[in-house]
Image (tube, grey):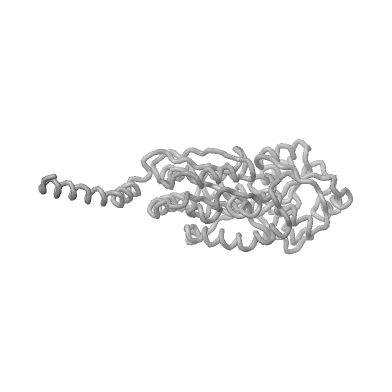
Amino acid sequence: MKLAHRRQFLHLAAGAAALPPVSHIARAQAYPSRPITMVVAFAAGGSGDTIMRIVADHMRSTLGQTIVIENVGGAAGSIGVGRVARAAPDGYMLSYGNWATHVLNGAVYALNYDVLKDFEPISIVSTESIAIVGRKSLPANDLKGLIGWLKANPSKASAGTTGPGGVGHVIGVFFQQETGTKFEFVPYRGLAPAMQDMIAGQIDIMFDTAANSMPQGRSGNVKGFAVTAQARLAVAPDLPTADEAGLPGFYMSNWRGLWAPKGTLADVIAKLNGAVRNAMADQAVRKRLIELGQELLPAEQLTPEALGTLQRAEIERWWPIIKAAGIKAQ
């Protein structure tokens, strides 16, 4: 190779070697340039699905791209979350989940991904208390009456859940421990089908998200006994707290968040976080979520760092408890 040609070749090679970092920056600046898929780890029609569709609808206007909601339920949400864990870290496939999918499942299932290490947190979306509800034909009319009925009928009642280690299952196990009751758990692919069966009288009780159960309670389709909050919910002021209903200290909260695959660029995470924050600042969005029983956080808590901190703290709190209780996927 002649000297001039060699110098030209080396110059081009050096230029090519410098391209990847520049192209990363260009991709982040251009993001998003095509539709985004948001994998919702819950069945269509349930509260989690409804909440994310409200938020995603507003995010579309901020990002200027279509957001495709893909419901991938099953195995308490681990199938859908696992799909995102294996996706390319380019910001075009996101995981929307909750306390169960991104904390509890790590202690319950033998996962092929790590709920903490394989994701980049984007933002908390909302949080909510859990409602203790039952079919409308139950003889009990308050929480003390429900506990009494369960004690009088050991192992005869049934509770709908999204599977072993799901929110309803974990809370149900601790309810049994706190009250000395025993009942059977019936797994479903999502909260919506479980609620449908309870309305039909096929199962007796649920430890359900407020968003899923409050509309049915207001319609008279189910009985509400208590919420696992320290204060009554604005959307259900007549429903007592567990403290008020006779089960003091029975507090639990289900929170929801958005994640991207590990390795997604910080600039992309920032754009997605900004879209969530814009949605949560919109009064129409806030009104709809509050009507669904959601508790909304101040803007300073809607950061990737806040979600990561919460997730780690919940893992440290709940994994030892779940393992001690022997809760495992069946």
- Residue 167 relative to residue 67: left or right: right
Quarter where residue 244 is shown: bottom right
Q: Residue furthest top?
A: 200
Q: Relative to residue 322, is residue 25 drawn left or right?
A: left
Q: Is 75 on the left or on the right of 325, as rendered?
A: left
Residue 88 image position (x, y, % from top left)? 44, 44
Q: Is residue 4 shown above or below 317?
A: above
Q: Residue at x 73, y 37 (%)?
A: 197
Q: Where's residue 209, x and y in %?
A: 66, 49
Q: Position of residue 157 (x, y in %)?
A: 82, 45
In the picture, measured across the screen, residue 252 lies left or right of residue 205, that is left
Q: Residue furthest right?
A: 152
Q: Quadrant of the N terminus?
A: top left
| Pick the front one: 307 or 3 | 3
Quarter of the rendering occupied by the C terminus: top right
Residue found at the far front of this picture: 1
